[in-house]
Structure formats: C-alpha cells, structure tokens
Image (cartoon, rainbow, N blue to C red):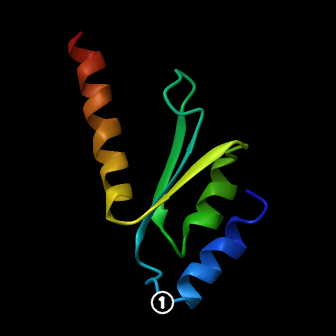
Amino acid sequence: LSRLLQIAARLIAAGLPAGTPAAAIASGTLAAQQQVVATLGELPECVREAGLASPVIIVVGEVAAFASRAQGQAQALRLVA
C-alpha cells in the first residue's frame, strides 16, 4: 500500500483515465473482508481514509465497479438466510 499512490499515478500518466473504476480488497474471502471502491484517481486517498492494511489486492478496470454491487448482493443474501 505504500506505493499505491505511485502506481495509480503511473497508470494515469500512461493513459488510463483517472475515472477508471478501481477497488482495494483486504482479507478477501474472510469474514473480516474490507473493501474500498473508488476511481483510480481517488483510490489512494480512499484507502488511506479507510485504514486498510496490507496485504491488499488492487483491481483496476470496469470489473472493479462490480465489487460494490457484489457486496450489496452478499449482504442481502445474509439477511434472507
């Protein structure tokens, strides 16, 4: 995570739009999973504000936009079960 700002800046400098969906996922698949979904340009700040700790998987691209929808569906399924 210490290099997330640099990674995001390099991707943007290489031509990836700052508005590209991105996600950071900590403790993936565990009950303690945390995730932040934002744009690539906003992700480093949002991750810092959320206090995510390494290790974290970073997902960049349109597929990252599905993370918040999937989380909402998983919560709905837990409420039904």
Can you give x and y, in whole percent of width and height, for residue 39 in the image?
46, 69
| Label 1 SS | loop
Residue at (30% x, 40% y) in the render: 70
Write down the quadrant of residue 54 in the picture.
Answer: top right
In the image, farthest residue toward the right: 2
In the image, farthest residue toward the top: 81
Image: 51 above or below 12: above
Residue at (32% x, 27% y) in the render: 75
Residue at (52% x, 20% y) in the render: 31
Can you give x and y, in whole percent of width and height, for residue 52 in the image?
67, 45
Image: 30 above or below 21: above
In the image, farthest residue toward the front: 14
Residue at (60% x, 32% y) in the render: 27
| Image quadrant occupied by the C terminus | top left
Can you give x and y, in whole percent of width and height, for residue 13 in the image?
58, 90
**Side (left or right) of 61 relative to 59:** left
**Side (left or right) of 8 relative to 68:** right
Can you give x and y, in whole percent of width and height, for residue 20 in the image?
40, 74
Q: Pointer 1: residues within 10 angstroms few (<14), some, or many (20+)?
A: few
Residue behind mark 1:
15
| Image quadrant occupied by the N terminus | bottom right
Q: What is the tally of numbered marks visible in this picture?
A: 1
* Mark 1 residue type: Gly
